[in-house]
Image (tube, grey):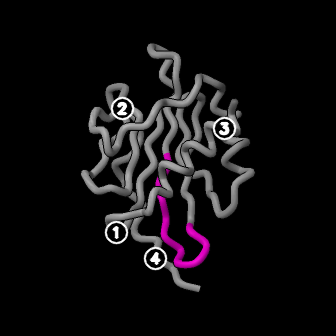
Amino acid sequence: MFNFSGTRPDDLGVKDGKLKPCPGTPNCVNSQSDKPQEKIEPLPAVPIYEVKKVIESMERTTIITETSNYLYAEFKSKLMGFVDDVEFYLDPAENVIHVRSASRLGKSDLGVNRARVEEIRAKLT
């Protein structure tokens, strides 16, 4: 119906063992953040292909990048076509999967990014 996809970020990925910080708006969660409004627990350490299987089972998803320790996917909302960028980093030092989920546009996501990460967590355990 509508398409508010915005522009794909060109600064995502893992840099020095870290995912990109959240922008300070309430439409992003990041397991590497210390800010309470952004903080979410990392996912359990599983192979990235298992995360990919979960993502592919969810509606309106597109895998953008996949390596042995990193996955980047886009999730598109049904009605308005808003896109969220979601990254997963298998951190061998901490033995967890760090996750960042952020809306491209707007300021509020009504908790969608946090809920999505928790849905993925539930499907992995």
Question: Which residue is depicted at the point 34% across and 69% down?
Answer: 106
Q: Which residue is mark 2?
A: 32
Is disc 4 in contact with disc 3, using a CB cutoff of under 8 Å? no
Q: Residues within 10 Å of mark 4 (few under 14, many from 20)?
A: some
Query: In 3D space, how far apart are the residues under numbered discs 4 and 3 (Cα atoms)?
Result: 29 Å
Q: Which residue is mark 4?
A: 4
Secondary structure that dominates the magenta span: loop
Please give left or right for residue 111 compared with residue 60 in the image.
left
Whichever of labels 2 and 4 marks the residue nearer the N terminus, that label is: 4
Whichever of labels 3 and 2 marks the residue nearer the N terminus, that label is: 2
Query: In 3D space, how far apart are the residues under numbered discs 3 and 2 (Cα atoms)?
Result: 20 Å
Q: Give the numbered dot on residue 106.
A: 1
Query: In 3D space, how far apart are the residues under numbered discs 4 and 1 (Cα atoms)?
Result: 10 Å
Q: Nearer the viewer, mark 3 or mark 2?
A: 3
Whichever of labels 4 and 3 marks the residue nearer the N terminus, that label is: 4
Q: Nearer the viewer, mark 2 or mark 4?
A: 2
Q: Nearer the viewer, mark 3 or mark 1?
A: 3
Question: Which residue is depicted at the point 28% across and 56% down?
Answer: 25
Q: Which residues are magenta?
A: 77-86
Q: Give the numbered dot on residue 122.
A: 3
Is disc 2 in contact with disc 4, using a CB cutoff of under 8 Å? no
Amino acid bearing label 3 = Ala
Amino acid bearing label 2 = Gln
Whichever of labels 4 and 1 marks the residue nearer the N terminus, that label is: 4
